[in-house]
Amino acid sequence: MSLSAAMRRFDRPDKANPWFAKFKYSNIQGLGYEKGVVRRDPSSIIVANNKYYTWYTRAKPPCQPVGHALATEVLPAHPWDLADVWYATSSDGHHWEERGPAVERGPAGAYDERSVFTPEVLAHEGRYYLVYQVAISPNHRCTPESIAIAWSDSPDGPWTKSPAPIVEPDESGEVDERAEPEQATVKGSWDSLQVHDPSLLYREGGFWLYYKGEGIGYSHMESKWGVATSDSPLGPYIKSPFNPVSNSGHEVVVWKYAGGVAGLVNRCGPEKNTIQFAPDGINFEIKSRVVVPPQAAGPLRIDEAQNSEPLSGFSWGLSHVIPHSSHLIMQGRDPLGLAEIEEPWDFLIRWELDHHRRTYV
C-alpha cells in the first residue's frame, strides 16, 4: 500500500495519545480582574495546612506600562516591572484569598531593587523554596536579569532571601542596554542577556532548576530552556553542558513523571505548543501537540504515589490572561468575557484538562 509523506509520519490519533490535552478555562474569585492591579505568572500550586497555596507576580502601578523608553522609578516599562511576589490560599481551587506579599523588592542598589517576579515553589523536607526572577534599575530593554531564591519553614513566611542571585546570564556578547538584543555589537550565547521563569524540581537526589534564556543578538521570540543543577537548593548551581535543552518555549512549565521530566513548551520557537518528555531530564522529545494551552501555567503539584499517568502532574492549575490580546480571543473564543473588559490589566484564571469535549474552551 502506498503512503504519502504525511501518513508515514502519522503515529496515532490524539484521542489515543495519553500525552494529548485539551483545556477549558474559568474565572476565579479573589485573583480575578481588578482595575489598576496586575496579577500574573502564578507558581505551581501546593497543598499545605489543608489549603491550596499559590504565589504570583503582583504590581499596582499608577498607570498602564509605558515601555522601556519612558519608564522611570515609578512608571513601569511592562506589566511585570516594579512588581513583588504575593501569595494566596484556597480551600477549593476556585475561591482564593489574597494573603499579601511574600518576597518584596530590595532597597536601592540591591540585586532585586527594580522588580521581583515570576515565582515558582518547591516544598522539600519541611522547608519551602521560592525561586523567582529579579531585575535592577534602570529598566532598559537589554538590562540583564537573574534568578534568585528565598526560603522559609512555613508557606506563610517569613522568607529569607539569598544574598545574591543563584543563576545569572552567561558573560558573553556585547550590547547597549538601551538597544534591542538584535543590535548586538558582539553576539552572545543563547542565555547571555536574561535568565527567566525558573522552575525547581528535586530529582535523583539533587535540585534541578529549569529556566528560560534570552541571548544578546537574538530576538525576544527566540527563547529556549536550560537547566542548572545543585546538591543543595540554595546552590551553587551549575549549568548543564547540554544547554539549551529545548529549541523553543517561553514560560517554563515542568513536572515529574516516571522518573523523568515533562514540560509544556509554548509560544516561542518551531516546537511551540507541544508537550514534551525527557526520561533523563535533558533530552526532550515531543509527545503531543496542543491547541490554546494556558499561558504561564502553574499546575497542581501532586505526591509521587499519585503520579501514575503522563498528565497526572498537569491536571489543573492557574494561569494568567491579558485582556484584549489574549490567546483565547485570538483563537476566536472568549469564554471568560475578556473582550468586554475596558482596560487590559493582567489577571489570573483557572485551567483544567478536558479530555472529552470536542471544543477546546
Image (cartoon, rainbow, N blue to C red):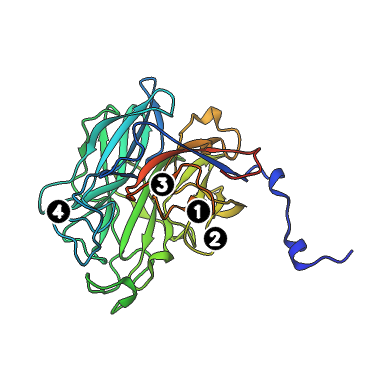
Q: Is tag 1's residue or tag 2's residue first in the polypeptide sequence?
A: 1
Q: Quadrant of the C terminus?
A: top right
Q: Residue at left 34%, top 47%?
A: 346
Q: Say the numbered circle drawn on residue 265.
A: 1
From the viewer's perspective, is the residue at label 2 or at label 4 nearer?
4
Q: Say the numbered circle drawn on residue 271.
A: 2
The quarter of the picture where residue 233 lies is top left
- Location of mark 3 (residue): 340
Tell me the element at label 1.
strand
From the viewer's perspective, is the residue at label 2 or at label 3 nearer?
3
Instruction: Pinpoint residue 249: horizontal percent, then vertical percent.
Output: 46, 57
Q: Is tag 4's residue or tag 3's residue first in the polypeptide sequence?
A: 4
Q: Nearer the viewer, residue 310 or 270?
A: 270
Q: Quadrant of the N terminus?
A: bottom right
Q: Residue at left 44%, top 52%?
A: 326
Q: Is tag 4's residue or tag 1's residue first in the polypeptide sequence?
A: 4
State how far apart marks 2 and 4 are (Cα).
Answer: 38 Å
Instruction: Pinpoint residue 131: horizontal percent, then vertical percent.
Output: 31, 44
Q: Amino acid at mark 1?
A: Val
State how far apart marks 1 and 3 are (Cα).
Answer: 29 Å
Q: Amino acid at mark 2?
A: Glu
Q: Is tag 1's residue or tag 3's residue first in the polypeptide sequence?
A: 1
State how far apart marks 4 and 1 are (Cα).
Answer: 34 Å
Q: Amino acid at mark 4?
A: Val
